[in-house]
Image: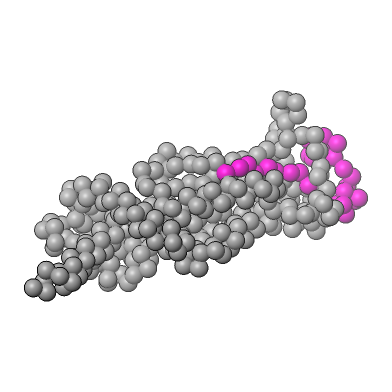
Amino acid sequence: MAILGYDFLQFVHNIAMDLLDGLRAFVATAESGSFTKAADRLGLSNRLTSKYVAELEARLGTRLLQRTTRRVGLTPAGEDLLARAPALLDDLDLMLSDMTEGTRGLSGVLRISAPVTFGETTLTEMLRRFAAPHPDLTIDLRLDDAHVDLASEGIDLAFRIGTPVVSSLKVQRLGQIETHLVAAPAYLSRHGTPRGPQDLKTHVCIADTNRRTPALWRFSKQGHAQDVLLSSRFMVNSARAVRDLARAGHGIALVPDFILGDDLQTGRLVHLLPEYETGHAPLSAIYLEGRTLPRKVRALIDFACADLHAKR
């Protein structure tokens, strides 16, 4: 009679877990198009990920993936399953996290993508404070100025500066990044202080090539905008490097406020033409559309929103 007692429940539990392992491996492989990427996303070996998918196909009695030497594609049955499986897994993960995190705090892995400089100067410290009360929570932060594909990389949440252009993403506005025109006192003592935007044409300027128009700086005052096309002596794809060059007195720069720290308060840098607006960009939290938002992701969004507003 043991089969009707504990042994039977254990038998059912093992079947359920095998099925879930197979579904997770299948979804990760289908979304990333690669067993290798799926294995990295799941924290498993390539061989085990492939094994889980093969066992799921055997259990369902149908082929879900078309394997080639370069890429893994979906069969019609795989397309049908992929349309249903992510929501099922999300609902199950949400249920389990609500049951466990309610008593133990947040747990599991939280994969986050962010721009390099913003991540280094602002986000890492924020994440440290967010994770401090949750010893079972693992933060996997990927810093990259390119907009990575959230599904294929297994990213739970991305921090983005600027207006997202992908319609399949959910966007929650967290705040706004302001830019400031700055220069070091040493530079201004040698070259003088510009009195208006057009004066910048006679100055040494430092361009951040991460901007959409590195050489075209826009200024606005009382609703009237004027553009200044500049030839820059220094061009660099790092806001931190742009600030450092300005600090060292090598020219005038447009830099985002999060990189300045206390430079303006201490006088290391001087805010130029403060009567002009010099641009701003939204800071947003981005996640995949059509997915149940896990509690830990929602908690991070709420924490980031409150933390960023507190600093304003």
Confirm whether residue 304 shows in the render: yes
Compared with 263, 38 (above or below) is below
Confirm whether residue 86 shows in the render: no
The colour scheme used to paint the residues is one colour
* Image coords of residue 69 (percent x, y): 26, 63
Residue drawn at 43 percent across, 58 percent down: 102
Looking at the image, residue 253 sits to the left or right of residue 62; the answer is right
Q: Quadrant of the N terminus?
A: bottom left
Residue 201 among magenta residues = yes
Residue drawn at 61 percent across, 42 percent down: 175
Q: Farthest residue in the left direction? A: 1
* Along the line of sight, the residue nearer the viewer: 123 or 210: 123
Residue drawn at 81 percent across, 45 percent down: 271
Compared with 162, 116 (above or below) is below
Residue drawn at 26 percent across, 64 percent down: 21
Residue 295 among magenta residues = no
Q: How many marks?
A: 0
Q: Quadrant of residue 108?
A: bottom left
* Along the line of sight, the residue nearer the viewer: 142 or 140: 140
Q: Farthest residue in the right direction? A: 189
Q: Quadrant of residue 154?
A: bottom left
Q: Quadrant of the C terminus?
A: top right
* Image coords of residue 84 (percent x, y): 25, 47
Q: Farthest residue in the top direction? A: 223
Looking at the image, residue 22 sits to the left or right of residue 196; the answer is left
* Along the line of sight, the residue nearer the viewer: 22 or 211: 22
Q: Which residues, given as a range, are shown in magenta? A: 174-202
